[in-house]
Amino acid sequence: MNINVVIVGHVDHGKSTLIGRLLYDSESIKEGRVEEIQKLAEEYKRRFEFAYFIDSFDDELKEERTIDTTGVMFKSKKNLYSITDVPGHKEFIKNMLTGASHADVAVLVVAADEGVQEQTGRHAFLIHMLGIKQIFVVVNKMDVVGYREDKFLDTRNRVSQLLASLDYHDVQFIPGSAMEGDNIYKPSERMEWYKGPTLIQTLDRVQITNRARPLRFVVQDAYSVNSERVVVGRVESGTLRAGDEVLFQPSNAKAKVQKIEAFQCELPEASTGDSVGIVVDKEVKRGDVCGLMKASPIPVTEFLGEAVLLEQSIRKGDKVELRCATRRVQCEIKEIRERINSETGEIMEKHPFSITENDAAIILFATEPLVVEKFSEIPELGRFVLVRNRNIGAGIVLETTN
Ligand code: GDP
């Protein structure tokens, strides 16, 4: 089984060391090539502490792609693991925009000597926003606190409270030392009080269930050919079948899918990622999104999003263009709930009047009726770009309200 793991945690709590340890102990590195691990760890660290903002957004997207292809991988006896990271808020948002790989599970690293720090909470929140349901905690640097159980329990209590507030319950906590190799890949003999699994045993037990996602077909274009209404678009989630009864929103047009076509062939169905033409019996508009009648998209006029501003400033009451999938609408910045430091995730101000370049923020947007989805549920319809002459920011949908 292939499992994508995202490793998060406060800076210097031991993420790179943990990855080095996993690679080394799983013998993913050939003998005599320890320097390779160091290089990978260095590389990982560089990525983690990357100077996030270079001049052009496009360049960054390119950069992001090259980074994606250099993912770190290792094999246990059971699984093949790919490791990614959520380096900072801006990186995170960009990952969302490029649709970078989705993580199945998250490992939160918390150093036993420092406990919960700023990014511990922030990263846990990001993981929750990403919709990652499984999280494990490594209480690292146990060697620094003399492998003491009370120190482990202190940290576990604090982190448990934090995770419970994000709806993560019964989380597996592993006391370990990435540096010394305790309980990461090999069981430790220095913490007899701990009877639980190592990190790799925990990961090897992961079950991945593919959630069935509802159909969302996004209309790119609609026209008539020989009195047939042809709609061209992309299946962003779920499966579309000939004969399906669907509802297009925000047009509120109920229609029957008479035919599905691609490259002049008729198809019985189209699934996630397919671009197809469909013939329907109703008029629909570019930017509409359809779903099956029983789980159709609901247009909203307000939603809560988290955005990062790449340039310029925005103030409460401003109007900016919002692009989501193929829709472009004018939206109003109705409320700015929090201004967030996009490097550290720290909340800088509650209810500020404005935010500026490089800030992240939780914003309540008001729009004309628009189909968006929570990013954690349907990411393709849960990310957006803000435009005022050019791209000034990007974000994800946290909550849809009406
Ligand atoms: P990152 O910023 O989270 O990737 O942290 P690093 O892996 O770079 O580790 C930060 C520092 O902590 C480095 O000096 C590591 O050698 C050290 N470190 C990492 N894990 C451990 C550990 O288990 N025990 C001890 N004593 N030091 C560790």
Image (cartoon, rainbow, N blue to C red):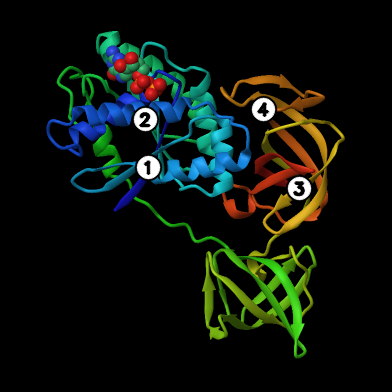
Tell me the residue that label 2 is attached to: 43
Q: Is label 2 in a helix, a strand or a loop?
A: helix
Callout 3: helix, strand or loop? Answer: strand
**What residue is disc 4 on?**
358
**Nearest-to-viewer mark from 4 and 3:** 4
Q: Residues within 10 Å of mark 3 (few under 14, many from 20)?
A: many
When the figure is inspected, residue 161 is found, relative to residue 200, above or below; the finding is: above
Q: Are marks 4 and 2 in contact (CB under 8 Å)?
A: no
Residue at 74 percent of width and 35 percent of height: 363
**Residue at the bottom extreme?**
226
Q: Amino acid at mark 2?
A: Glu
Q: According to the image, label 3 marks what residue? A: 322
Dividing the image into four equal quarters, which quarter contains ligand 1?
top left
Given residues 283 and 200, the one toward you in this image is 283
Mark closer to the observer (3, 1):
1
Q: Amino acid at mark 1?
A: Thr
Q: Determine which of the numbered discs, if any, sits on residue 70 in the image.
A: 1
Label 1 – label 4 distance at C-alpha: 27 Å
CA neighbours of label 2 inside 10 A, class few (<14), some (14 to 19), many (20+): some
